[in-house]
Amino acid sequence: MIGLPEDYFVYPHRRRGMDHARYPYRILPRTSPVQWPGGARIALWVAVHAGHFPMDMPLKPFTAPGGMERPYPSFWDFTQRDYGSRIGIYRLMQAMGSRGVKGTALISAMLAREYPVLMDDIAKAGWEPACAGLDMAHLHHGGVAEADERAWVALATSLLRGRFGDAVQGWHSPAHSESHRTPDIVAGAGYAWTSGWLNDDMPYAFATEAGTLTAMPLPQDLADQRMLHQQNMATEDFVNAVLAAHAALDAEAKATGSGRILTVSVTPWLMGQPHRIRAFGAMLDAILARGAVWSATGSEIMQAWRAQPG
Amino acid sequence: MLKTPGHYDFMPWRRRPRITWPNGARIAFWVAPNIEHYEYDPPPNARRMPWPRPVPDVAGYSWRDYGNRAGFWRMADVMARHGVRGSVSLNVAVCDHYPEIVERCCELGWELFSHGTYNTRYFYGMTEEQQRAVIRENRETILRASGQSMDGWLTPAISNDETTQHILAEEGILYTLDLLHDDQPTPIRTRGGQRLVSIPYSLEVNDVPLFVMRNTPPDRYAAICKAQFDLLYEEGADSGTVMCLPIHPYLIGQPHRIAALEEVLRHVTGHDKVWLATGREIARHYIDHHLAAHDAWIAEGTP
């Protein structure tokens, strides 16, 4: 029997800390306490996935969550997602605006070309515009050529900065997928924060070749796209899970005296449906009713976090 | 290829020699936190690719990383609050990467057993000598990091090969968790006749299948775990049962799920005939008090 090659038993990164150089190991309960404006216990960050799913999007090397599920040309899948940009996102704006809840739109930059009016309305809603790549057909992953990846980031950035200017500070890698070099390219393009990594409840410094990014917490596990679409759960299950997360984080903030972040990751074509939008509003009401909530955009939370002493 | 594992005898549930637990407990309840490191850029294995997406699988990697940064600490606090010790299914490289985690486990009086070196290094395709070398190195690492003897084993990602159980027995491992055939400990047959027992693990109340594969919301998870406990507690009046609660910090330690663990542990510890044990304690008790009777019953043809 030949067995496995010798290098299968070599562990070049077996040492204290991480097996890459992006950030040191950090223990959440041992981080310095964070104080939010107004003494809030919870920074509420509503991140809205304003995604564009082209009908001819590639399904390899993996299908993006929310990607086309039926054979080309799937009007079924395309139009269901496109509904979000026409109807669903406006319901979210109304539900959030009427409650004074801010948002960050994670925008497929091609939408700035496809639907410039939607960009105007995002600006009018007071939402922060952040870049979620070109669209869901352009996933950043280890198999993408460096020249292509650089061109995608440059085009996406110029599309959104062309409309919103320097307000575009955040980058969200679509499908939480990146190549080894994505953070370097993104930092080089002048972004301040990213939300592709799922490993913390609080921001942390993320090293790149082009300076330090702030990694913002955006869970995939607690997101309507995963729970309602991929996992086929009921609306109530998603809402209850968000409220359970809020209760746990709020209790931690009380116990430790350190603020926490509740990130609500929602998708217009899912949470903006008629049968769900009231549950969304009721969920926001329940969050606000607990008190000591600071509703903020991603950049505002990042700035408050960066301004902490120590 | 084998048609069956061949490691255990048929032991029907009726008239099986009775198991009793310390202090008249009906059930031995043990919690197995899987404390793992999945490598950023692991080597390929012919039978299983470590990540579903091209490397780096940022979504997969960073999700697991959450467990070590945040989830473990939250989970450990809840367990400590309920007086429930863990028996850690440990990727032993965690001792090198995150010694703070191992220190916390030891401070809480938890048992450490091996779940391989990394969860991205599978046993599939290893020679016997290669498997043996990993097992020995894992034993040394656990001893060095905690002073504990490595008595239990769960093959990383349950990637055991045909000969793994034989080698575990030959290397002096007390109990294996790679088999899911029973609600009680059972003897494991190995080629050299060395003693090895199986302790019930679980994929039914394991948070990975429930949360990731079966799309279970947190409150439903708690209900399933409580139902599992209630029935085994009831049946344990006749013969002592075992319930293992395998958990993963990156899943159960999420803010939206931690209350579900709290609810399960509150339910379990609210019963008086429960033995809150570790894997090693269950294995030792079984070996000392019941293994011989089970072996004899099997030899008689399970009358």
Image (cartoon, grey):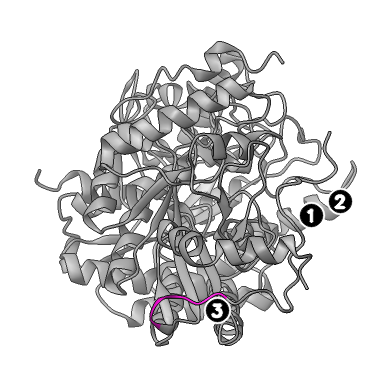
Q: CA distance from mark 3 to mark 1?
A: 46 Å
Callout 2 and callout 1 share a chain: yes
Query: Residue A167: x and y, percent?
Result: 37, 41
Q: Chain of mark 2?
A: A
For discs 2 and 3, the disc positioned in front in the rendered view:
3
Q: Is residue B268 above or below residue A25?
A: below
Q: Are marks 2 and 1 in contact (CB under 8 Å)?
A: yes
Occupied quadrant, residue B190: top right
Give whichever of A249, A115 is nearer the camera: A249
- The residue indicated by pointer 1 is A79
Callout 2 and callout 3 share a chain: no
Secondary structure under tag 3 reads: helix
Query: Residue A122: x and y, percent?
Result: 50, 54
Residue A75 disc label: 2
Residue A149 disc label: none
Secondary structure under tag 2 reads: helix
